[in-house]
Amino acid sequence: MPKFTLNGVELEAKEGQTIIQAAMAAGFEIPHYCYHPDLPIDGNCRMCLVEVEKMPKLPPSCTTVVTEGMVVRSNTDRVRQSVQGVLEFLLINHPVDCPVCDQAGECRLQDYYMVYGLHTSEIPLEMKVRKRKVIDLGPMVVLDQERCVLCSRCIRFFDNVTHTGEMQFFGRGDHVAIGTFEDRPLDNPYSGNVVDICPVGALTSRDFRFKCRVWFLHSTDSVCGGCSTGCNMRIDHRDGTIFRLLPRRNVEVNRSWLCDEGRLTHHEVAAGDRILRPMMRGRDGMQAPVTWKEAVASVNSRLKEIAGINGGDAIIGFASPSATNEALFLFKRYLGEQVGATQFEFRIDSEDKKVTEEEDEILRHVDKHPNSMGAINLGLMSQELGGIDRAIESARAGRIKAGVVIYYKPLVERPGDAQAEARIAELIGALEYSVVLAAHKADWQREASVLLPVTAWSEESGTYTNYQGRVQLASKAVEPGGDILALWEVFASLLYESGDGLLWLSPDDVFASLAENTPAFRGIVLEQTRLPGALPTP
Amino acid sequence: MNKILLVNIEKPDQKNIAKYRERGGYTALEKALAMQPADIINEVKTSGLRGRGGAGFPTGMKWGFVPTNAGKPTYLLCNADESEPGTFKDRILMERDPHLLIEGMAIACFALNCQLSYIYLRGEYEFIAHIMQRALDEAYEAGILGPSIMGKDFALDLHLHLGQGAYICGEETSLIESLEGYRGYPRIKPPFPATHGFLASPTVVNNVETLCALPWIITNGAAAHAAIGTEKSKGTKLFSVSGHVNSPGVYEVDMGYPLLDFINNEAGGIPNGRALKAVIPGGSSVPVLTAAECDGVLLDYESLLKAGSMLGSGGMIVLDDSTKMPEVLSVIADFYAHESCGQCTPCREGTGWAAKILRNLVAGKGKRADIDLLLKIADMMEGKTICPLADADVMPIRSFVTKFRSEFEALCAS
């Protein structure tokens, strides 16, 4: 562990760490474009040059490995002049079209200009090198070659992370430009990442560009609901609308990346009609709106009545692996302890087997639910039933009479989705009394005795357990509309109605009970479920 | 005057292996093969031979950096990507005496225990590729290259690789990148090619002229080589002279030969009775010397450095008093702007910017402030890049502008 000083402050570096890595770990900012913690070092931008004692030239801090006793300075006039020089070079041929550039507000050229530049441009307009603009690079990315600082982050991403190598430099000298061969589209499931890692406005998101200026957006830390990987993401939203999803770096899970499907899941949440108020089937067989109070009282008494007559075996709790641990915990507690139900299941399509199965070697898993591992750990998997098919069979045979069913359509589409939804519809059709909790409207929900509108992903706080068993917190980003309640709240109300001694006022309260009562969560404090997430102690 | 390299250069049949051998060719290799590799390296060290590509690094020391226990093969790469403006010395060696290079490379390969070696030939030298390839084929046929060189239990394959016309591929690490099939970008050092070069293996990159000097050293001994030249610059050096001289061409002189004598005696003096104005002694990337500064300067590494310039590749450009210096600089700056690989920001943007300012100045559209801007750009580029291409642009810009400032000012309207 070599010790060194940076601007007079004594720091310790890990063996083999370069100056910029050690400085960033200690909270020092060294300006840079090409360095990225999850990409191989390239050293081309020359922004991060620093002064090191006994070195005649200014070495790049991204490539220079810290050695014992090294004396580094990043705040001298010589370094500042060098940074300013590089910045001036980067800007001479830049179009400076910030007013119409989507990167404005989160652009490294803008940021560093305000800190290090503030110079007057000395190059007349007609001297600038012109390059191509608005090049369509497929479904996720739009390229503007003039704004590019040629840091090669995108090239290195495709070379070293996806190993698809679509992008390359073309030309030489100040006519170098990035691009794909013959402008071919970026056709790989991770292409959206290059928009995030582009430090300037050269690569912008086809999905997000021109939708909203970034300074109007609010950010909330969340976890992707698209599959069992549980990539850490940031939800950028404004006035209840999600505008984009960005990765949050978590070295243990997704590093700095997201897959394109996960990146676009907010469109799935926003698509289709929402159920806005509780509905109950009347004597005429038609569903009609009721208040939550009426619905909760009715559900509680009917379930207990059926359990009283037919026993707990006649009641099934069919959970969704897209629900949070908090909601699933209260769901099980209510049905198991208050109603006395004995049948629990969540598997429509062998989620328990797919949860750890990789779809590719980078991030994606085959199971398109964020919390199958949580559902397993909470004991929602029944050996006896072994999946929805046996549950339907039992319901048809009259062994199961009533059920509480949570259903979320997966946010990432797969060909089997419609079939899976049809199985849920079959189960509802076969039950005498059914309570359906869902976010989005679907035709089959008309068969339900009670239909309760609940929050979708991003609308409630809670934890998900990913394929590694890592418990990760996703915070609430947007308010649901109508009379929609958070899923955990519905079961908290039912527990209250039923007379459970505990009272939960927030998902944090629920997590505390959950951690206390469930072996797979024992000892985990909510704070630990933020970065990098909490693994249960073995 | 000693002749080490150009002994047989005027003989038109020298390309033929039989004639080459008749004149004593491949006897040095034979002698070397009977020696211990370590002894050959020592011989080269004692000879005082320094790299003739431009940097002048001692060749024997460079070979000594190659680890012998790396567990990986060692590669020798011949840098024949001669593209510095004003330099055409390697060309004549390969064009007229290709077997000399092959013999030199075979000696070096044996000394370095290298069994696979490449000649990286400049793309524009395609016509030389045919000559060189024929010589290689002859050498294979004669058993000088191949599974057992000259009957010795030592295999050597020597391949010719033609570049695609990029000046930057003459920089050793981008030569390696290019040879590996990548874009010709210089690599960040360390690690150096001596340990992590071609295919991440120990690699030596030597210039054509350097390798061609080896047969003579082996034949005549290190002491004979060390006896030629000055205290620190040993042997002879090829100079390719162009510009305002009566006899432009390639000349071999002892290190330490006086610069002005060279221009007047070897290169035939300046035509039409004009006076000398300036000399670029070592290729376009070295600082220009004014006529006054040339006084008493000797053609060796130390003397030229002391005079404020460099020996470089030996590509000498002589300029007489009719020369418009801003125009010369503009041509030089255009070259570096065109040849910058575009990897590092300062060089990519700076070379292009400086070239444009100079074009404007020469066209009479410049301002006085542009002259200082050129010097500022030079400061912004110098020493901030991975390879020395930016510095190669900085040196002429700074020397031309400071030494001939009045000519630049005269071009500005006010």
Image (cartoon, rainbow, N blue to C red):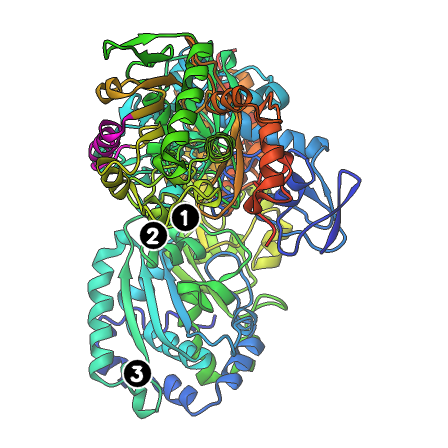
For image coordinates 38% across by 84% down, the residue present is: B29
Q: Quadrant of residue A204?
A: top left
Q: Quadrant of residue A296?
A: top left
Q: Chain of mark 1?
A: B
Closer to us: B169 or A296 = A296
Q: Amino acid at mark 1?
A: Tyr
Q: Amino acid at mark 2?
A: Tyr
Closer to us: B105 or A150 = A150
Closer to us: B105 or A503 = A503
Q: Secondary structure at mark 2?
A: loop
Tag 2–tag 1 contact (CB < 8 Å)? yes
Which residue is the site of mark 2?
Answer: B182
Measure the C-alpha gap from mark 2 to mark 1: 8 Å
The answer to whether marks 3 and 2 sit on the same chain is yes
What secondary structure predominates along the stretch shown in magenta? helix
Which residue is the site of mark 3?
Answer: B23
Which residue is the site of mark 1?
Answer: B185
Q: Position of residue A421 (x, y in %)?
A: 24, 31
The answer to whether marks 2 and 1 sit on the same chain is yes
Q: Which residues are magenta?
A: A413-432
